[in-house]
Image (cartoon, rainbow, N blue to C red):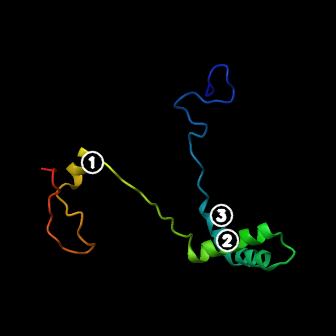
Amino acid sequence: MAFAKGNTFAFKKGRSGNPGGRPSLPVDLRELVKVKTASAVAVLVDVMESKKSPPSARVAAATALLDRGWGRPTQSVEADVKGELSPQFLELFGGWNVNAKPGANAPAVPIPGSE
């Protein structure tokens, strides 16, 4: 029984409600979808350009087209890191020159305090 006693909507701790995971698409279905790509794009363009389409549908169609044509915009992450480097980090990267420019063959410079 997957449910906890007395609660018919919760799973027991450590149990998944979907132990097999999401099933993958059969290869023939993927091929069918690929064949329909041009008509799917045409539908998106029609929805986007139709004055009868609700604004939300037009925006969704435009977004879908832009995301597929140009890729989704990259998201930047800003971090303000304070404190000391962990012993695990220093063990892994302590001998590396962390200030070297990418592609430069700079010699490894130990980080102070990592000895």
Neighbourhood count class around disc 1 (C-alpha, 10 Å): few under 14, some 14–19, many 20 upward: few
Outermost residue, right direction?
52
Neighbourhood count class around disc 3 (C-alpha, 10 Å): few under 14, some 14–19, many 20 upward: few
Residue bearing the label numbered 2: 63
Residue type at the position of mark 1: Glu
Outermost residue, left direction?
115
Residue type at the position of mark 3: Leu
Q: Quadrant of the N terminus?
A: top right
Which of the two labelled residues, at mark 2 and mark 1, occupies the earlier sequence position?
A: 2
Left or right, 94 with respect to 72, comes to left
* Callouts 1 and 3 close, C-beta under 8 Å: no
Residue type at the position of mark 2: Thr
Residue bearing the label numbered 3: 29
Which of the two labelled residues, at mark 1 and mark 3, occupies the earlier sequence position?
A: 3
**Residue 22 or residue 49, whichever sits in front:** 49
x and y percentages locating residue 40 in the rendered image? 72, 73
Residue bearing the label numbered 1: 84
In 3D space, how far apart are the residues under numbered discs 1 and 3 (Cα atoms)? Answer: 52 Å
x and y percentages locating residue 27 in the rendered image? 59, 63
Neighbourhood count class around disc 2 (C-alpha, 10 Å): few under 14, some 14–19, many 20 upward: some
In 3D space, how far apart are the residues under numbered discs 3 and 2 (Cα atoms)? Answer: 25 Å
Please name the residue shown 22% across and 75% down the image: 104
Which of the two labelled residues, at mark 3 and mark 2, occupies the earlier sequence position?
A: 3
SS at mark 3?
Answer: helix
* Callouts 3 and 2 close, C-beta under 8 Å: no
